[in-house]
Image (cartoon, helix red, strand yellow):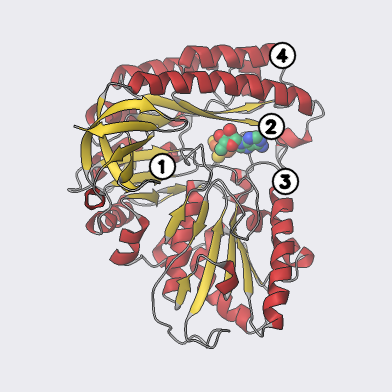
């Protein structure tokens, strides 16, 4: 599978990033867009609409890295069913939208996308071609049957907990059934999802995602995740370790552990006791050939001493931490049900910086949560000045149906939200630029990931997750090289090999 990150200034550091809209057609732009790509022979599948024996799937991914990972795993499941992926929706026999519901009229965007797909399906039908359409992800989970009612061209609606049932859902849909699979599965989907083969992993690149935890029990009052992804579930150490070793054996050098609430991960360890994320990272750091570890997204309340200790002790754990606070006002934090104060957060940051002085901090902010006063917002600006994030993401509050925040009657006017966001983003940007400027002249380790835009260039990531452009040989992809940062670009750094 090829992962394309199109038009992304955020580079997907946050575990939940919103798609920026755009159409299914190649001109469409999403923050993160994934097209699954597989190569397997047909097993028991009926001939494709183009008369060949190979069926093709086009997967479009909206949102966070967890969706990127899920799209890969769906692709793996379909691969065993004889599907190859295509980059061209016009070639597809199956079109899958892997949707995100985190902010703004997510469902409406999916419905307008489905309107465009209806036209495409009609045109293909006139050419005697059949197109099956599936909607997966958090919008599928939230909307369920309603999707088929409003968009009858959809054949399959499948929620995030049931992806392992996708091949059966397709078989049922082929017989003419409209399939809605949104019940939380009792069985462990990870046990049932097939693993990709080495060639597929290698194609996906030297940096891989590995979901270790799903769901959330925190119930922040603005957030839809506990309703769409369900309650917290952690995978076992054995399962994670096996998957990590398989990735490394196929050439992966960096693994980012994913979870909606990744530092709430607690799984059965190799000694039979329950482990936390710090112990899991220690275990994974022993894998030969695995050079870098990261994890995202974390909640301040779950940052325990063992995890902070891992940042001090583990060379392979990169000095970057995405630790959202959302607001710098205690009363807003309370209304958001974050269950920590500004002081708790700042104390925590102090301990983390003591353990790993070169750590780069990243965060998420919401402006204009219902009831947020000018003074509350100024508190957020002060907090940002105090922490000086290397990188951060900020959003206008968007009422999500079914969440407590949406029910409030003291919503903030749109223009006030916009003004606050503008001021906050200007400040965050200033700090991001200052952090990047501070890197110039430093010699750092760079993991070379892929070719750059110009011939002779490769792009890698700094320990602090910044994209770095350097002149190097494509045979060096996967190597960690010493480079000296020479200057900053708009969202990247330039360097020379030393
Ligand atoms: N409105 C605005 N931003 C939101 N986020 C989550 N829910 C909402 C919402 N309803 C943001 C939070 C979270 C990030 C992934 O998305 O900042 O950390
Ligand atoms: Fe949403 Fe809060 Fe859970 Fe994060 S911790 S996924 S913001 S409910």
1 vs 4, front mark: 4
Mark drawn on residue 105? 3
If you read the primary sequence from the N terminus, does the residue marked by circle 2 or circle 3 appear first? Answer: 3
Report the residue at 42% width, 37% height from top.
Answer: 263
Q: What secondary structure is marked by label 4?
A: helix
For the residue labelled by badge 1, is the local secondary structure a helix, a strand or a loop?
Answer: loop
- Relative to the observer, which residue lies in front, 206 or 211? 206
Q: Which residue is mark 1?
A: 265
Which tag, 3 or 1, sits closer to the chain's start?
3
Kindly indicate whether the residue at mark 2 contacts the one at mark 1 (C-beta within 8 angstroms).
no
Q: Quadrant of residue 254?
A: top left
Q: Residue furthest right?
A: 409
- Horizontal relation, residue 469 to residue 165: left or right: left
Q: List the residue tagged with mark 4.
A: 374
Is label 3 in a helix, a strand or a loop? loop
The percent coordinates of residue 470 (x first, y second) are: 30, 38
Residue under the point 54% across and 47% down: 231
Using the numbered discs, state the Cα–Cα distance from disc 1 to disc 4 in whole angstroms. 36 Å
| Label 2 element class | loop
Who comes first in sequence, dot 1 or dot 2?
1
């Amino acid at each position: 599978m090829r992962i394309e990150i199109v038009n992304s200034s955020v580079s997907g550091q946050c575990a939940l990033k919103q798609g920026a809209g755009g159409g299914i057609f190649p001109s469409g732009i999403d923050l993160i867009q994934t097209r699954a790509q597989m190569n397997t022979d047909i097993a028991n599948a009926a001939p494709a609409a183009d008369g060949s024996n190979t069926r093709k799937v086009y997967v479009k991914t909206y949102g966070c890295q967890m969706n990127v990972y899920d799209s890969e795993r769906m692709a793996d499941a379909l691969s065993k069913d004889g599907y190859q992926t295509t980059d061209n929706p016009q070639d597809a026999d199956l079109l899958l939208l892997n949707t995100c519901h985190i902010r703004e009229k997510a469902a409406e965007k999916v419905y307008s996308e489905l309107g465009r797909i209806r036209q495409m399906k009609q045109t293909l039908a006139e050419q005697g071609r059949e197109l099956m359409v599936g909607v997966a992800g958090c919008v599928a989970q939230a909307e369920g049957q309603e999707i088929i009612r409003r968009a009858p061209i959809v054949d399959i609606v499948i929620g995030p907990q049931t992806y392992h049932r996708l091949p059966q859902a397709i078989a049922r849909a082929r017989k003419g059934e409209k399939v809605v699979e949104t019940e939380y599965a009792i069985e462990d989907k990870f046990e049932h999802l097939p693993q990709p083969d080495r060639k597929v992993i290698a194609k996906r690149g030297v940096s891989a995602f590995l979901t270790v935890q799903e769901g959330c029990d925190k119930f922040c009052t603005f957030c839809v995740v506990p309703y769409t992804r369900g309650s917290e579930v952690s995978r076992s150490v054995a399962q994670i370790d096996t998957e990590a070793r398989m990735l490394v054996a196929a050439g992966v050098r960096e693994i980012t552990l994913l979870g909606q609430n990744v530092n709430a991960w607690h799984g059965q360890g190799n000694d039979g006791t329950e482990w936390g994320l710090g112990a899991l990272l220690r275990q994974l750091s022993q894998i030969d050939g695995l050079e870098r570890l990261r994890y995202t997204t974390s909640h301040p309340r779950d940052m325990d001493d063992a995890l902070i200790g891992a940042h001090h002790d583990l060379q392979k754990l990169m000095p970057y931490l995405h630790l959202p606070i959302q607001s710098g006002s205690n009363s807003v934090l309370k209304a958001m049900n974050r269950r920590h104060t500004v002081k708790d957060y700042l104390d925590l940051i102090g301990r983390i910086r003591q353990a790993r002085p070169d750590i780069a901090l990243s965060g998420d902010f919401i402006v204009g949560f219902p009831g947020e006063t000018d003074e509350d917002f100024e508190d957020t600006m002060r907090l940002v000045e105090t922490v000086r994030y290397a990188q951060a993401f900020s959003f206008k509050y968007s009422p999500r149906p079914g969440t407590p925040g949406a029910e409030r009657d003291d919503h903030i006017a749109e223009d006030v939200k916009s003004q606050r966001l503008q001021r906050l983003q200007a400040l965050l940007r200033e700090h991001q630029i200052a952090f990047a400027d501070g890197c110039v002249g430093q010699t750092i380790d760079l993991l070379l990931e892929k070719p750059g835009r110009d011939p002779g260039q490769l792009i890698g990531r700094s320990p602090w997750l910044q994209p770095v452009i350097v002149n190097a040989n494509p045979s060096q992809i996967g190597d960690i090289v010493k480079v000296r940062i020479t200057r900053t670009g708009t969202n990247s750094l330039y360097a020379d090999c030393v």
